[in-house]
Image (tube, rainbow, N blue to C red):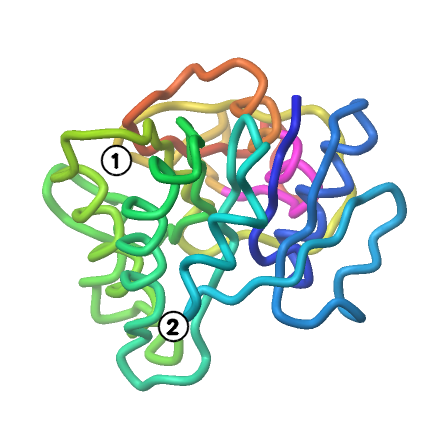
Amino acid sequence: MHIAVIGASGWLGGLIAREAIARGHTVTAVGRDASRLEIPGTRIAVADLDDPDSIATAVASADVVVSSVTDRTTDDRSRIAATVRTLLDVLPRAGVSRVAFVGGGGSLETAPGVRAVDAPTFPGEYKAEALAQADALAILRAHAGPPDWTYMSPPPHYLVPGEKSGRYIVRGGDSPAVNESGESWITAGDFAAAFVDELENDQFPRQRFTAGAVDPRG
């Protein structure tokens, strides 16, 4: 499979690119700065989301595009939703039929109809990004045409550094994946592995899904 990763210079985008390469996939790392895209085994394509034609050229031969794009430049994190709109417009023109988003976990529900981001205890420094990611998911859910999409949320609070263990559960929908100890958490390595699983298996088309560790936190 040929996978184009927009945002491969970032933490999760880079982990997803490396996991895909380790499984034998062809990976194109897409970003504005070629010097930050030097992941062994990848092709490099310089492109900018502010220049949609450059994105279309960079991803034209991909079977699926991964978007791992965040926003630290605006107070309302508006670039997150803008990225979704751009890719929904550009990818059909580029001949790409699938896109997978690294999303946010703040809009997962801790009880029916109650989002984690709306709780008084939700960390204020992450709230703008969580709300922007919720807006991005709403845009996807309202989009009826191509491309097919999927959106992966980490647990609301506990995406932690760590290697892949292979011991994780996945579930579709708006509730966190909870282990037998009642916890919802995952390492970044397992998050990337679960994400690439979805690229390979297409288990959650036009859905949000999430993943969590089987084991309790040590």
Please say if 56 is above or below 177: below
Q: Which residue is mark 2?
A: 126
Q: Residue at the right extreme?
A: 40
Question: Which residue shows up at 83% across the image and 59% down it?
Answer: 38
Q: Which residues are magenta?
A: 185-193
Tell me the SS state at disc 1: loop
The kind of secondary structure the magenta stretch mainly shows is: helix
Mark earlier in primary sequence (1, 2): 2
Question: Which residue shows up at 70% across the image and 55% down it?
Answer: 161
Separation of marks 1 and 2 at Cα, in angstroms: 19 Å
Please say if 100 is above or below 137: above
**Is residue 69 shown left or right of residue 136?**
right
Nearest the eye: 143 or 46: 46
Nearest the eye: 14 or 112: 14
Q: Which residue is mark 1?
A: 174
What's the amino acid at mark 2?
A: Tyr
Q: Whole-percent x and y of residue 197?
A: 59, 22
